[in-house]
Each structure stands twice: as structure tokens, then as C-alpha cells.
Image (cartoon, grey):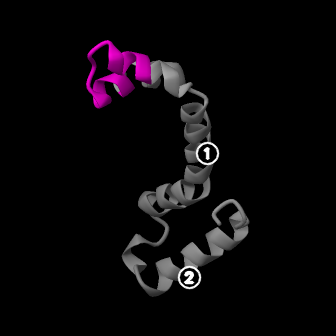
Amino acid sequence: MAHALPAVVVGLSLVFVGLNLFPALYQTVFMVAFAYAVLFLPNAAGSVRAAAASVPPVLEQVGRTLGLSPFNAWRRVALPIAW
């Protein structure tokens, strides 16, 4: 849903919320950082998801057969490939 929202809609809604609910936060660096997070976090999450999906599961299974725990197999095999 966040991909479908135009930046103007997010900006105006944050101005509304900032003025009505949190007037102390209006026009602060925190509000700008929150707006950027709302706008660009879905793009970053999509990129991370695509990179993680491109790792073949068989490589992680090979790490498991070599004696690694599930977390260590992910950390030592899948994470560097996705990175």
C-alpha cells in the first residue's frame, strides 16, 4: 500500500497529524526523518526481499549438512550472498 501513496498525500497527512496530535514535533528533524522512513522504507524492504529470495535454498541446506545451526547457516551462507 505504501507504494501506491503519492508523496504529497504522505506529506499532507503528516502535516495534519503533526499539527493536531503532536504539535511539539511539527517542523522538527524527527518528523522529516519519519516522513522519509514512511516514503522510502517500502522500497528498501522490497530490495532486501528480492536479494534474499535470489539466494538458492540448496546452499543454506548444504551449510546445514556441514553442521551449522539454522542461524549460522543463514549468517555464514545466505547473508553474504544476499549482501
Residue 71: x percent and y percent? Answer: 30, 30
By secondary structure, the bulk of the magenta-drawn segment is best described as helix
Look at the numbered disc 2 and give the secondary structure of its residue: helix
| 63 drawn magenta | yes
- Please determine whether, in this image, residue 5 is positioned above or below residue 41: below
Q: Position of residue 58 (x, y in %)?
A: 50, 22
Amino acid beneath label 2? Phe
The boundaries of the magenta stretch are 61-74
Of 68 and 51, which appears nearest the observer? 68
> Is residue 7 or residue 26 the one in the foreground?
7
Within 10 Å of disc 2 (Cα), the crowding (few <14, some 14-19, many 20+) is: some
Of the numbered discs 1 and 2, the one sitting upstream in the chain is 2
Q: Are marks 1 and 2 in contact (CB under 8 Å)?
A: no
Q: Splitting the image into 4 quarters, where does residue 1 fall?
A: bottom right
Q: Is residue 11 left or right of residue 18?
A: right
**Residue 83 in view in this figure:** no
Amino acid type indicated by mark 1: Gly
Q: Which residue is mark 1?
A: 46
Name the residue: 42% across, 23% down: 61
Left or right: residue 6 compared with residue 30: right
Residue under circle 2? 16
> How far is mark 1 from mark 2, CA to CA?
28 Å
Whether residue 63 can be seen here:
yes
Q: Identify the residue at the far top of this view.
A: 66
Q: How many discs appear?
A: 2
